Image (cartoon, helix red, strand yellow):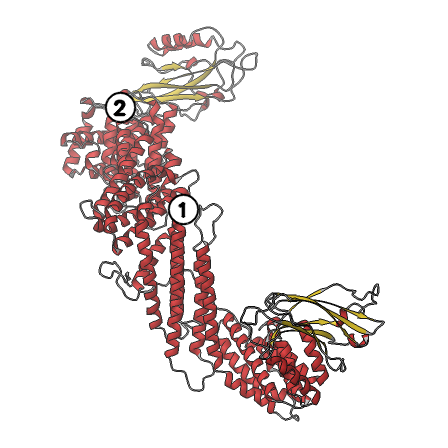
Amino acid sequence: MSTLLDIKSSVLRQVQVCPSFRRRTEQEPGSASADPQEPATGAWKPGDGVEFFAHMRLMLKKGEGRQGLPCPEVPLRSGSPAPPEPVDPSRGLRALVPEEVDMLYEEALYTVLYRAGTMGPDQVDDEEALLSYLQQVFGTSTEEHTQTIERVRKAKAPTYALKVSVIRAKNLLAKDPNGFSDPYCMLGILPASDTTREPRAQKEQRFGFRKGSKRGGPLPAKCIQVTEVKSSTLNPVWKEHFLFEIEDVSTDQLHLDIWDHDDDVSLVEACRKLNEVIGLKGMGRYFKQIVKSARANGTAGPTEDHTDDFLGCLNIPVRRDTAMSQRGRSGFLSHLLLLSHLLRFEHPAEEPNSSSWRGELSTPAATILCLHGAQSNLSPLQLAVLHWQVSSRHHQTCTLDYSYLLGLLDDMQAHWEEAPSLPQEQEEGLADSFSAFSEFGLQLLRQLRDYFPATNSTAVYRLELLLKCLGKLQFFQPSFEICPFETELNMDVAAALKRGNREWYDRILNARSPREQPGPQRLPGLVVLADAIYDDLQSCYGVYASLFHSILNVDVFTLTFRQLERLVAEEAWVLTEELSPKMTLEVASGLFELYLTLADLQRFWDSIPGRDSRSLALAGIHTPFLPAVKLWLQVLRDQAKWRLQGAVDVDTLEPVDPSSRHSSSAATAGLCLSHIQELWVRLAWPDPAQAQGLGTQLGQDMCEATLFYTELLRKKVDTQPGAAGEAVSEALCVVLNNVELVRKAAGQALKGLAWPEGAPGLEGVLPRPLLSCTQALDDDLHREAHTVTAHLTSKMVGDIRKYVQHISLSPDSIQNDEAVAPLMKYLDEKLALLNSSLVKGNLSRVLEALWELLLQAILQALGANRDVSADFYSRFHFTLEALVTFFHAEGQGLPLESLRDGSYKRLKEELRLHKCSTRECIEQFYLDKLKQRTLEQNRFGRLSVRCHYEVAEQRLAVEVLHAADLLPLDANGLSDPFVIVELGPPHLFPLVRSQRTQVKTRTLHPVYDELFYFSVPAEACRRRGACVLFTVMDHDWLSTNDFAGEAALGLGGVSGVARPQVGGGARAGQPVTLHLCRPRAQVRSALRMLEGRTSKEAQEFVKKLKELEKCMEADP
């Protein structure tokens, strides 16, 4: 018996493989579809429907990314460079004529030849290297280069000047009683002399203004200057600047003293007089007068240890005798031209990746520019302005990296805050550069989609930097007396974006759907345009919107959406009005696809918090599309049938792969139904009333297509020849799995046709017509599955009967498990095959059918064998329980509740009755009558009676009161009823005869009020099965009486039998209403059992009942 439990692991454990009904990623080959009623004018011709559904999948795929609000996202890292920006050589600085180039060349050579000071660590100190670099920049020959150098050397030597900045001092000595000092600085130039100087390392020989100097010769004018006095401080801050002319940059020295001021002598006046002195002797005399103002208790001068807080630099001359200066060009303009020339040389446009150049100049170029800026006495602000002017102009002729331009603006802003002042001419030049750059930037923004595509991360980053540059320009706007912007920058940006949107829209419209074409030809192009608009708005919302809002405070998404939505709505309204009278399947298909995208646009706007699509130009756009949608759905119905027909035609009724148990046509049918449901969800028709009508019709079409598919399957499997001797047909298993899969797919798809959102209180609810259609389809498919199941199990009936007969014919000497083993082995083999071929739901369905077949086979075996031994019935009782264990399989198979219901109860009862004696069977017959309850309680009428037991007289009183709603058994629609009253079982009341009431003619509601007495002992009334049987008959004068109904009343609960009688009245007890019925199966089973008995008692009982059955007619 080990096979009984092996089914748990090897047969009945089922892993259901149910593929998802969502659209799969696998593409099917496309094919076309048409309305069969209009094959000549339709867009889709009759065929296998593949192309139609392929096109529908494209529409669904298009809508996959259009559900809900798109999240702002980082653009794809494409890795490709940004599209090249437009360049215009005319937007750069004016090209120099040859004469001006020669002058600029001399200017650069002059800067190198007369440089002074010490070069920094990152600069070039080799004069020949700098001159050679300039020769390359200006492209001169060696001879021309040599001649130009000679000409520059002969020019007037420059006058050098030293620019000194006195910033601050720290921790000076306190010279005043209050613990502070009143410090000031005295500084001047010590000219060179012919005598040899003392080494500077000897600190004790340092020069001091108060000591005078031993050098002879005159002292130049304005050689000594003084700072302001800072009162009561030891950490003075001056930030004063001085300029000294220098005769000999090699020998002249700068000297500075710090003094504490104590009297009211004007230091400025003292220095003025001191500067008027000729010769060191006079200078010393005036210094002595200044020294008198020092503290009396101090030393001869301020301590030398506190003269170290000096900051200054040696600058190269600002007034030079060159060709440039002779023609009136300032150092500012010369530096601008020189920088522009060097920039063009350092950054040629022909090099690859030139747009990523960030202004990295070579070391010689940086050195020359540094020298020229210093020699031209240009401030840091002027240098920053020059770099911006030249680089921004150069960018418009040869693209630079925007991060470099942004850095130049940041540098200029930092210097602007320190010293926001420029000469008017230079400020006007800066304003012009701002205007030119903003104009260039706005031109790029007009073509935003071309130069900064949202899918290119490099381009988006460049856009961010460009917007930051434009935003930085607004910082300088309040500082200009001559404003470079006519309006606010964000207004200019918005205007540029609007213009660019219109140009982009017109470009696609003219290319795809030119207005001069007729409407049907324009329709496909308009669909492309609408799709492009949606994709563009997604990019705008996900990429551009955050950049423009955070940097320039421009709502680019709202601006773009409003403009493009209005434009496409105007085109759609006009086109639908033109095409409505010309509606064909081709036009309907195009309009349907166009409507889907327009509806997506509306939902896109609705999904943004605070937005309402009712304010859009697309509001109400669904109305003119309704006829096209209806026609397209009709096409969908026919194409679905053609698609299913084609799928079944090529289906081999074999599993598509080892992991699946359905064939290819079921997968196709599931996909078709899923696509239809997804399409309905995407359609989301906004009008609830129209949506209900469309959804109901679509649901009915889906039900029709599903049933059409099952009919095709049944026809196909009927035409296939079965294998000889094959008990389990693999094709039938596949068909059964197909039906189950399609049933689930259809149910899921129909549930998706619920009320659309916006129907108050009805979201997700199926309309009543559609709900009825869904329930009817489910019932039909269940019946179809049961039909296929019956067809499948019918091939096993013969084998099952053979093995059951083997059990019945087995001799008593064989053990029960040996007799049952062949049947169990057969079931194990077949169920193993079914387990590998069926999904779980179908396996359960087949198990239920097989279980019923087995029960019926055993019942037939029992009926065919009479007067057999008790071991015969014991063996089948063992077989029944073994089969229950087998099919239950410890919870992995059928539930015990379903196994032990229906025919099982009947078989169990028959086996029990076969073990009983004749009298026990008769008692069971009456017990079954007491247990039976009519399902239709008013069908056969009611009978009111009253019973009690009179203990003193030892008799049972039975009173028949009246009846109601009896069956009309005569031709006049009435009856002539009477009631037979008898006690049973007969062996309990052997001496009691039956009694009867009077006949009540022509009535269905007779009133009897007749009392009958039965002299019986109380002990007999308490026995098992003791009852009063009331049989209602229709009296016929010329033929046999007709049976109208019967009812039984158990005597165990009658007053006086179950408990002592109260009051002793003759009519004690309450009336009882009994519902009349006909004998049911469980009653007749006991009768059949008695029929097989040969005893006299059994035969007489059966004979009596047979006579009664002759009076019974079939239920009306």
Q: Quadrant of the N terminus?
A: bottom right
Quarter of the rendering containing residue 1095: bottom right
Disc marking residue 428: 2
Front one among 273 and 123 = 123
Measured as percent of width and height from the top left, residue 630 is found at 33, 53
Secondary element under disc 2, as helix, strand or loop, is helix
Disc marking residue 70: 1
Badge 2: how crowded within 10 Å, few (<14), some, or many (20+)?
Answer: some
> Is 912 placed above or below 757 here?
below
Which residue is rendered at x = 55% and y = 68% of the image? 973
Q: Tag 2: residue type?
A: Glu
Measured as percent of width and height from the top left, residue 917 is found at 72, 85
Q: Nearer the viewer, mark 1 or mark 2?
A: 1
Extreme right residue here? 952
Measured as percent of width and height from the top left, residue 423 is found at 29, 20
Secondary element under disc 1, as helix, strand or loop, is loop
Disc marking residue 721: none
> Is 111 placed above or below 924 here?
above
Measured as percent of width and height from the top left, residue 451 is found at 28, 43
> Is 403 placed above or below 251 here?
below
Quick check: can you spot residue 390? Answer: no
Q: Quadrant of the C terminus?
A: bottom right
Total count of labels: 2
Which residue is rendered at x = 50% and y = 69% of the image? 16
Instruction: Give me the C-alpha separation between circle 1 and circle 2.
Output: 46 Å
> Is 870 placed above or below 355 here?
below
Quick check: can you spot residue 242? Answer: yes
Front one among 454 and 959 = 959
Extreme top residue here? 264
Q: Tag 1: residue type?
A: Pro
Mark found first going from the N terminus, 1 or 2: 1
Question: In this rendering, would 884 be left or right of 27?
Answer: right
